[in-house]
Image (cartoon, grey):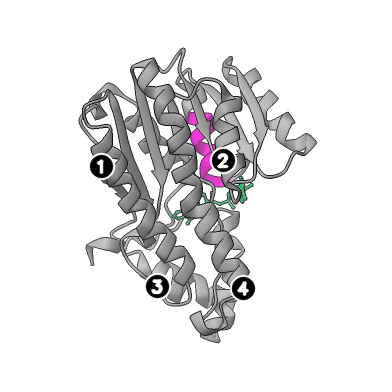
């Protein structure tokens, strides 16, 4: 059980981050939810998880595209035994038409934020004598697709960063690993279906079948629950010597 531990999960009001929050809360960890918004829904979500699982859940607003806010999130969290760098966005366009502000935002949110939160969290983990850094990367941290230059760059970057963090914490009771999901049907994927259809000049149904699930030999989406289960496993004693590696759940995508 993770009772007494605190997990900070960036970008956790939706999709994979929210699924990880539920799973770690069910395992007894106190949870810090985060997103860049600060809506009533965000706070209601925190209250709901707390009520259903009995752990302490707080919502802390912080924009993961801003270095100082990334670091402030960890400071405001107080304890940070488990850091899940999950916040991420996507934009689909050819590189010569890729908007610079989208490139900057993706590199900042999907990659740079993990540098800042990890830098702020490691001293706390060392002091506590235990820690887990879990970076939600992607199969796109290991393979490329056209029209996703910023995303593929950021995800390859975070896979590399994970290895460095593992080496720098190798003598501490801290591990750092990346989870590399294939396609998971979350709002992030749903929202890129229209642009994918447009780039390839096909219908949205064809985009799902011929482009998105074409990558995944299983022909099935990975589920949020499956990714959350991997995160929970990485926090368990069985994973104490798993560090600096990638937990790949992609229906066979990267086997090809
Ligand atoms: P999602 O859109 O459902 O959730 C993203 C979360 O990030 C939301 O809570 C959103 O509020 C938050 N967020 C966005 N911008 C932020 C910012 N500037 N500051 C703080 N929070 C911010 O997406 P998801 O599919 O659950 O993606 C979560 C992570 O999983 C991302 O890093 C994504 O790249 C990765 N991933 C997703 C898939 C997939 O198929 N869905 C596959 C591989 C990896």
Residue 206 horizontal/vertical position (percent): 51, 77
In percent of width and height, residue 205 lies at 55, 73
Residue at the image point whose x is 49% and y is 35% from the top: 20
Which quarter of the rendering shows the N terminus? top left
Q: Is residue 176 covered in magenta? A: no
Q: Quadrant of residue 73?
A: top right
Q: According to the image, label 2 marks what residue?
A: 70
Q: Secondary structure at mark 4?
A: helix
Q: Does the residue at mark 2 contact the one at mark 3 (Cβ under 8 Å)?
A: no
Crowd around label 3: few <14 · some 14–19 · many ≥20 (10 Å): few
State the image coordinates of residue 114 (x, y, percent, origin top left): 46, 45
Residue placed at 33% from the left, 52% from the top?
A: 159
Among numbered discs 3 and 1, the one appearing first in the sequence:
3
Check if mark 3's residue and mark 4's residue have beta carbons within 8 Å. Answer: no
> Reading the chain from its start, which is encountered first: label 3 or label 4?
3
Is residue 199 visible to us here?
yes
The answer for how far apart the CA atoms under marks 2 and 3 are is 29 Å
Residue 156 in the figure: left or right of residue 109? left
Look at mark 1 in the image and give the residue it sits on: 244
Residue tagged 4: 194
């Amino acid at each position: 059980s993770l009772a007494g531990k605190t997990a900070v999960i960036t970008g956790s009001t939706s999709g994979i981050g929210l699924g990880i929050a539920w799973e770690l809360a069910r395992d007894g960890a106190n949870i810090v939810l985060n997103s860049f918004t600060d809506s009533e829904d965000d706070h209601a979500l925190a209250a709901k998880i707390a009520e259903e699982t009995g752990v302490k859940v707080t919502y802390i607003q912080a924009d993961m595209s801003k270095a100082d806010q990334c670091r402030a999130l960890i400071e405001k969290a107080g304890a940070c035994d488990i850091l899940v760098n999950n916040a991420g966005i996507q934009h689909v366009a050819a590189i010569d038409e890729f908007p610079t502000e989208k490139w900057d935002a993706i590199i900042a949110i999907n990659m740079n934020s993990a540098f800042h939160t990890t830098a702020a969290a490691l001293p706390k983990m060392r002091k506590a004598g235990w820690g887990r850094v879990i970076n939600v990367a992607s199969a796109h941290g290991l393979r490329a697709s056209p029209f996703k230059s910023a995303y593929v760059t950021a995800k390859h970057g975070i896979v590399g960063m994970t290895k460095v963090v593992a080496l720098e914490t190798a003598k501490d009771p801290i591990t750092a690993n990346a989870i590399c999901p294939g396609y998971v049907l979350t709002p992030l994927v749903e929202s890129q279906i229209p642009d994918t259809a447009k780039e390839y000049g096909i219908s949205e149904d064809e985009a799902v079948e011929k482009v998105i699930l074409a990558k995944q030999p299983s022909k099935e989406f990975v589920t949020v629950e499956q990714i959350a289960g991997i995160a929970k496993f990485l926090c368990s004693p069985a994973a104490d010597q798993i560090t600096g590696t990638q937990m790949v759940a992609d229906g066979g995508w990267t086997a090809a």
